[in-house]
Amino acid sequence: MQIISVENVSYSYDKQNMAIKNVSFSVQRGEYVSIIGHNGSGKSTIARLLNALIKPDEGEVTVDGLSSLDKKNLFEIRKRVGVVFQNPDNQLVASIVEDDVAFGPENLGVPREEIGERIEFALSAVGMTEFRKSSPVRLSGGQKQRIAIAGVLALKPDVLVLDESTAMLDPRGRKEVLDVVEKLNKEQGVTVISITHYMEETVRADRVLVMDGGELILQGCPQEIFAKKDVLTAIGLEIPPAMRIAEKLVARGVPLPSGILTEERLGEELCKL
Ligand code: ADP
Ligand code: MG
């Protein structure tokens, strides 16, 4: 079932430049979609369109059948689409972890007794229950982002949008966050839209959308996308480093175990969808 539909959407912040040009895609409930593109390609603009922070100049965005063009839908859309941003330090508002997670539901007017349950659910979903009484300032970057994700989960969104939420983290923090997001998608059925400029992060997605200059230029499962190396290189993106290394090893005659993806093997791999 479709949860998000973006139909022929264009958006400009100013008259000279179009940030998004006639973009169309849809997202199914429970899907894990990655959006990749270099700086300025329009990724964050899409995130803002999805949770109705901005509305299309042309075309239409609907979430669960609700159009963001209709003002009376905005509150419902924002409840359904939770966004986690890049900088964890800008997203945490309280001095105790559990108060931070409670902030969103309290603002939505969720009853007191239900807030406790939501904090418990959200912290356990991101594996941070033991930090409930901690101060966010003492946490690592990865842990802070997991708290930011818990804050969004406490709102019980249908769709979790991560806008470069791993960009400021070290490799360990990135893995922590990605593992939590993958678990939420697989085990809780949360629809995930993960925006990134790290090609290797898109490996986890069911489907990858490639943005360039405000246009959606490619979409497909990760294998299909990585196979278009020439297109990716032309717009300044690269296939994942692990795949490049695997290819170099093959070129030197080192046998690779099955399951490791190289360009040669791509043709044989089937998409999950
Ligand atoms: P990305 O997230 O892929 O880096 P953005 O969606 O932030 O891309 O930006 C797309 C285009 O819109 C860029 O040309 C950028 O300069 C422009 N843009 C983004 N935010 C604003 C803003 N608040 N005001 C004016 N222009 C903006
Ligand atoms: Mg951005």
Image (cartoon, helix red, strand yellow):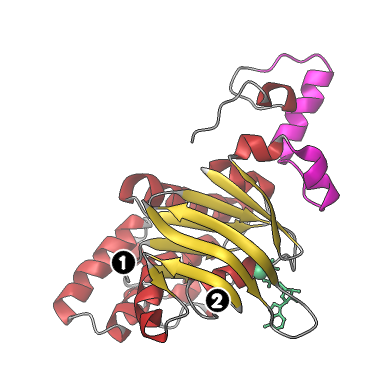
User: Which residue position is annotated with label 2?
Assistant: 89
SS label for mark 1: loop
Q: How many numbered discs, if any?
A: 2
Q: Give the residue type at disc 2.
A: Asp
Tell me if 48 is positioned left or right of 155 in this view: right
* Ligand 1 located in image quadrant: bottom right
| Residue at 39% from the left image edge and 74% from the top image edge | 77
| Residue at 35% from the left image edge and 66% from the top image edge | 157
Is residue 262 shown above or below 91? above
| Disc 1 C-beta below 8 A from ligand 2 | no
Q: Give the residue type at disc 1.
A: Lys
Residue 193 at what x, y percent from top left? 51, 57
Q: Quadrant of residue 113?
A: bottom left
User: Which residue position is annotated with label 1?
Assistant: 156
Mark 1 surroundings within 10 Å by alpha-carbon count, few (fewer than 14), some (14 through 19), many (20 or more): some
Is residue 159 shown above or below 72? above
Q: Are marks 2 and 1 in contact (CB under 8 Å)?
A: no
Residue 112 at what x, y percent from top left? 17, 81
SS label for mark 2: helix
| Residue at 67% from the left image edge and 40% from the top image edge | 225
Could you tell me if residue 176 is visible in this image?
Answer: yes
Magenta extent: 228-256
Sooner in the amino-acid sequence: mark 2 or mark 1? 2
State yes or no: residue 223 in magenta. Answer: no
Nearer to us in this view, 199 or 228: 228
Q: Quadrant of residue 228?
A: top right
